[in-house]
Image: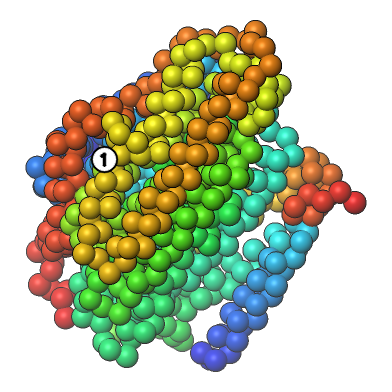
Amino acid sequence: MNALFAIAIAILTACGVYLLLRARTYPVVLGLTLLSYGVNLFLFASGGLTQARAPVLGTQVTYADPLPQALVLTAIVIGFGMTAFLLILSLLARRDLGSDHVDGGRE
Amino acid sequence: MSHLIIAPVILPLVAGAIILLLYRRPGAGLAINLAATMALFGISIALLGGAASGAYGVYALGDWPAPYGIVLVQDRLSALMVALTAALALSALLYATSGALRRDGHFHALFQFQLFGLNGAFLTGDLFNLFVFFEVLLIASYGLLLCGEGGGRDRTRAALHYVVLNLAGSAVFLVALGIIYSVTGTLNMADLAVKVANVRSEDAGLLGSGSLLLLVVFALKAALLPLHFWLPAAYSHAAAPVAALFAVMTKVGVYAILRVYTLIFGTTSVAGAALDWLLPLAILTIVLAGLGALAATSLRRLVSYLVILSVGTLLAGVSLFNAAGLAAALYYLLHTTLVTGALYLVADLIARSRGGVGDDLASGPAPARASLGMLFMLGAVAIAGLPPLSGFLGKLLVLEAAIGHAGMAWLWAGLLGSSLLAIIALSRAGSSLFWHTSGESKIRVRPAALVYAALPLAASPLLVVFAEPVSDYASATAAQLLAPEGYILAVLGSSLGAIAP
């Protein structure tokens, strides 16, 4: 399970970084979104991957670490807000710069 | 437990929310913004008074004991940073009342949210909470950057680059936090300090990579080479009060480096190895900023490179990692934040009074008021580090602290050479703005705006006059930072015995 999880994070992050380095704003937005997916999964795994355990301290001796879940939730909410803002800013840049190139080159 | 500690965080949040509700009445927004910022200044002075004795103030949110809950911690450093922010914010806001921004409802709300994020970042004692407050202050800064008239293509492009770069930085921050949490199982800074000191040797490498990633994030915020390219464009296109407030934003990165590497990682562990990178990068930053200042084509761009120069000088002082170096950096931090903030305001006044030419370093009408030239000269002398103003003292302290250090020759050569470049750049800028002129401008700026721009600049002579108490406070702060046991004991208190392995 750990290897599969790591490969998923690696693919998401690699795609995210690739798109982030593109010269158009929309791929950059998508790249940041993919990157944040990869990072969120990474953060989720930081407490150790566990199966079939109580989510919080219960009657069982062992339980899944609740803190990374809270961290991921916070990171998702922040990432969501930031993506919304970046989309609006990209639209503004499209209008002001005359193209969707990140450096605003004229076409 | 004193509730005063959380006041600098709650007050701007509530004030910002109220201003948002009163969005259609910018007059009310301005009044609330001014009142809240003045109250914040008062609170921060009270905090500073409490911290001066060396006592720690710990505020457990929701009364959850550390390390389970989030704590706010007030020590000498955080109280100093909050007070500095409040002072800078007050003068930037007063200046904003003399321009078009005072009628901008969004500006007032974002201004308060920016202070909310800044104060939270300075006061928090939890690493993930630091991330959250970073995001708060960043999203407020994205909005502020786009506030005010005179935007256009260049500002939008700068804002886009700034936002994308900082979002990528946030992703790196989260990765670093994930690594550190997976090794130590905690994010409370005091608890981390205990766990990092006792980390198993096979985990040390992983922890070291987390520490290095954190350094990358903080260096991006602080605009350390090679992560500084966003700064000149972003700062020089922001509205003047916003740019003045942003003068403290790079210092958040410096603060975070100071806090994390003195408290958590220290110098002895593998994780502290990140500090080896700091001095060479700081010296290169200083040199490059000097060259950038020389090549700048507008006054605000020139000031932006001086901001980078000051960041390099600050981090050079920090990277020496001795009491003298940290104290010198803290003294220099007070000086440079207020003076660069003031210089953005002065540059805006010059741009306004020159009309269409703006602050481009090209021939144009001479600014009508002679006092504007005086202000520029005072600011230039202060920031370049010429006696008798505070820049000279600050740089002298940093140079003195480097004596006997292995990197001394490089630092001295870099800092002194770069200061010379800054002096050349500033005198060239001054002569082309005030002497190579075509007639006199008809536009006269309001005297009130001149006074407000002079306010943060007045800090420079004050820092010289009160050099002894200020540097005593800086030395005490440095001593407190280099003895993190007090911080750990104050936060963890009775639970220390139970959680230490």
- Image quadrant assignment for residue B238: top right
Residue B286, image x and y in percent? 44, 54
Residue B324, image x and y in percent? 19, 54
**Residue beneath disc 1:** B393
Residue farthest along the right direction in this orientation: A107
Write the residue at 58% across / 54% down.
B229
Write the residue at 65% across / 52% down.
B161
Write the residue at 48% across / 71% down.
B175
In the image: residue B223, left or right of residue B500: right
Residue B307, image x and y in percent? 46, 44
- Image quadrant assignment for residue B455: top left
In the image: residue B470, left or right of residue B17: left
Q: Amino acid at mark 1?
A: Leu
Disc 1: CA contacts within 10 A as few (<14), some (14-19) or many (>=20) = many
Q: Is residue B191 above or below residue B123?
A: below
Q: In this orientation, which residue lies closer to the viewer: B294 or B26?
A: B294
Q: Is residue B383 above or below residue B479?
A: above
Element under label 1?
A: helix
Write the residue at 58% across / 21% down.
B435
Residue B455 visible in the picture: yes
Q: In this orientation, which residue lies closer to the viewer: B348 or B270?
A: B348
